[in-house]
Image (spheres, rainbow, N blue to C red):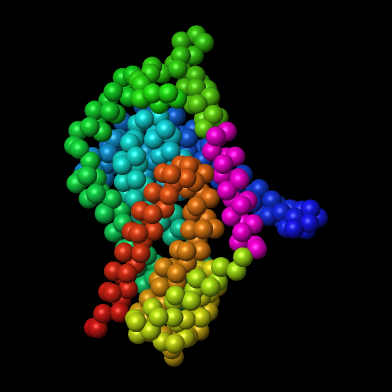
Amino acid sequence: MQPGALVDTAWPVLVEVAPRVARIAVFIGAGVFLANIAVGFGLVEKIAGFSKYLTRPANLPDEVGTAIVTTAASTTAGYGMLADFRESGRLTDAETLIAVTMNTFFGFVQHIFTFYAPVLIPILGLEVGLLYVGARAAIALGITVAGVLAGAVLLSRGSATDRSEDAAVDGGVEATDGGPEQPVTAPDTDDGDDSPAAVVRTAAEKTWPKLTRIVPRLAIIYVLVTLLVRTQDLRAVTGVAEPLTALLGLPGASLPVVAVFAFDTTAGAATIAPMIGPTFTPRTAVATMLLGGIISFAVSTFKRSIPFQYGIWGPTFGSKVIAVNTALKVVFIAAALAVLLAPI
């Protein structure tokens, strides 16, 4: 490729990616900062009283409750909190995976007010819209409950609580570059002040190094993925939908709906809405849209999940998060399809 052609291709990508990365960086920074604020002001203990009904049965530290509450307002900020807890040693890898799984329903809740209620339900109509949103809510809640059960079975009881208490006493756990995790005392301010201003200043000082490590990685991966999407045709992945629609007994008109839905939820909803009644029943319409959601994983994982998760966690752990998220979504959407298409 000639230098001029490379610039012509790369420049629009940079213009598209820069605002997205900047927005995500702001939310990640907010999440990490709020995590440090929560620890510094002792808010973890207060929030634990609200979230302990989730974290305690899952054998997770109290800090996870802070991230769960934050996720209901911002998924990115909630993930930023969990990344900070993992890097500081407050969460092990297994605990982080379970915490990410438990976050699913709370991440879904915010979309009810920002997308489903104001956009999707008016397009689909009240009956089909509520049935679709209810199905998605049940799927998200099922994944969260699965996370709680996984924690109850896989994590040892008491170890998380002990580690939280140790962190509260020692000021945290910090992984060193060349050895095992070592307990450290909370950073002292210049005059030993533990006033609110000092806590906020310390939280900001601890946030900046994490941003300088996460954001460049995030930007590079987003640019590479967007370039590949611009230069390659990914629509071939929707070809797998044809045997699935036939297997599930969906109308022939479901195939183009699935293809559109896989790339744009709003456009997919607008495509199927006029066909509800003459071609689709409410149940088959929702089943078709859920099937489009399964097909879209291949596209959305590549375009959004890989850059986001790799940027926050790094490739190794980010791949584990993506694998767990995708597997659980496919399993629970498949279960929802079975219920929707079961003979009445």
Q: Would you place residue 9 above or below residue 73 in this image? A: below
| Image coordinates for residue 236, horizontal then vertical, percent | 53, 73
- Residue 219 quadrant: top right
344 vs 292, nearest the viewer? 292
Q: Would you place residue 232 above or below residue 175 in this image? A: below
| Image coordinates for residue 210, horizontal then vertical, percent | 52, 32
164 vs 210, nearest the viewer? 210
Which secondary structure dominates the residues rendered in magenta? helix
Q: Is residue 289 magenta?
A: no
60 vs 295, nearest the viewer? 295
**Is residue 199 at least partly visible in the picture?**
yes
Instruction: Return the residue found at the far top.
Output: 191
Q: Quadrant of the C terminus?
A: bottom left
Q: Is residue 280 left or right of residue 144?
A: right
Q: Quadrant of the N terminus?
A: bottom right
Q: Residue at x 27, y 39 (%)?
A: 60
| Image coordinates for residue 267, horizontal then vertical, percent | 55, 73
- Residue 5 quadrant: bottom right
**Badge count:** 0
Instruction: Return the residue found at the far bottom.
Output: 278
Q: Would you place residue 29 above or below residue 139 in this image? A: above
11 vs 99, nearest the viewer? 11
**Is residue 261 at least partly visible in the picture?**
no
| Image coordinates for residue 109, horizontal then vertical, percent | 40, 55
Q: Residue at x 30, y 53 (%)?
A: 144
Q: Residue at x 45, y 25 (%)?
A: 177
Image: magenta residue range: 211-231
Instruction: Return the residue found at the far right.
Output: 4
Q: Residue at x 47, y 35 (%)?
A: 32
